[in-house]
Amino acid sequence: MDMFETLCQHGVTRLCHFTKLQSLAHILFEPDGILATSKIKKDKLNQIDSVRADGKLDYVCCSIEYPNSWYLTNAKSRDEDEIFRDWVIMYINPEIVKIRDVCVCECNAARNNGAYIRKGNSNSINNLFADRVNSFSYPRTHDMLSSCPTNAQSEILIKDGIPRDYITGIVVGNEEAAKLVYAMRKTLDIETIDIYISPRVVTKYWRTDIQSGIRPQEIKYNG
């Protein structure tokens, strides 16, 4: 069984990657989409993690089904930009694992300087959904959504980047941000990417929902 089939077996419908709203225009404008840090031109570089303790500068870090809201909260707290305050979460078609080299991590990839990163294959992906994972203190709950890894900070690292065609949706926390994304999408004449508003998905509250088998509400925004 290949990696995509394994993800489907667990019910995974998407990967997630977050960025600042001001960086979204660059991502949507270029067919190359989301680029790994090492691939971004310095004049366009607005790096979220200036340390990259995992050492994987050739990879784009993605969480599974829902964002790594703990790391997002940390990134927001370090953001000194007083003008552009909004962040967005992009939904990625999991079929990206068919066309890219992949690494897998059962926790935040930066933990212990990348010590938990493994080569991507069916076994390493299955490990993310085990009843217990080595780096996480809490067992998987009985009612937990099958599509979510046991440790919500688990990551799939995508080599080089994620083409724009693999971005299926963008979620924001309020209507004001949705209007900005909608205008951006309209200007670039991109109709294949849906826009959603979900205050719970962009915070840590989604974790409580999915542990009870509930998907947080996401309202599609149509302008």
Image: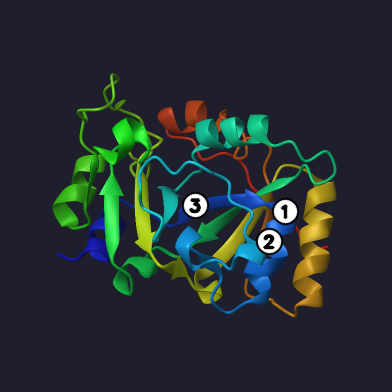
Residue located at (36% from left, 52% from top)? 56
| Disc 3 target residue | 16
Which of discs 3 and 2 lies nearer the camera? The answer is: 2
Q: CA distance from mark 2 to mark 1?
A: 5 Å
Q: Secondary structure at mark 3?
A: strand
- N-term mark: 3 or 2: 3
Label 2 close to label 1 by CB (< 8 Å): yes
On the image, the x and y values in percent for residue 38 come to: 46, 62
Is residue 149 at least partly visible in the picture? yes
Is residue 222 at least partly visible in the picture? no
Q: CA distance from mark 3 to mark 1?
A: 15 Å
Q: Nearer the viewer, residue 93 or 32?
A: 32
On the image, the x and y values in percent for residue 37 come to: 49, 59
Q: Which amino acid, mark 1?
A: Leu
- Residue 135 is left or right of residue 110, and the answer is left
On the image, the x and y values in percent for residue 218 come to: 64, 47
| Disc 1 target residue | 21
Per the rendering, the mark at residue 24 is: 2
Q: Which amino acid, mark 2?
A: Leu
